[in-house]
Amino acid sequence: MMKLLLDSCVSRQAVNELTEAGHEVLYAPDYWPKDPGDDEILNLAFDENRVVVTIDKDFGELTVRQGLPHSGLIRLVNLRVAQQGPTCIQVIELYSQELQAGSIVTAEPGYVRIRPANPTED
């Protein structure tokens, strides 16, 4: 079981599928009546030790370039609504340790990229 915070750009179908798979899911539109912005979503997820699931590449900017703290991130790229939930479930099954360590996992059809929580710099 993983604690997740799904951004409003992710489908409700994915919320339902992840919940049915046994994960603890918080869906941004159910928590906030208006979009609070990426910073606020990231802050809540960090405070509650939740992995953020999003389509929005701005979270990468906040976490990688600005160095804001986070508890892991799954970014979905070019996935149809019907693929979002199953892809997240598969990513969690395969990379739960990496996510719990704060890695950023980018998943797209046929490809997964992992950015470790503290990548070493050359």
Image: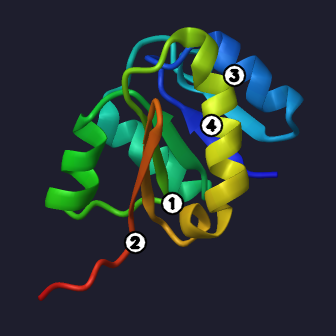
Secondary structure at badge 3 equals helix
| Residue type, numbered disc 3 | Val
- Residue matched to label 3: 15
Counting residues from the start of the chain, the first of labels 3 and 1 encountered is: 3
Neighbourhood count class around disc 1 (C-alpha, 10 Å): few under 14, some 14–19, many 20 upward: many
Circles 4 and 2: CB distance less than 8 Å? no
Asked if residue 13 is positioned above or below residue 63 in the image, the reply reads above
Question: What is the x, y in percent for residue 92?
Answer: 67, 50
Counting residues from the start of the chain, the first of labels 2 and 1 encountered is: 1
| Residue type, numbered disc 2 | Ala
Counting residues from the start of the chain, the first of labels 3 and 4 encountered is: 3
Point out the frontmost of discs 4 and 2: 4
Asked if residue 80 is positioned above or below residue 64 in the image, the reply reads above
- For the residues marked 4 and 2, what is the alpha-carbon distance in whole angstroms? 19 Å
Asked if residue 30 is positioned above or below residue 115 in the image, the reply reads above
- Residue matched to label 4: 88
- For the residues marked 3 and 4, what is the alpha-carbon distance in whole angstroms? 10 Å
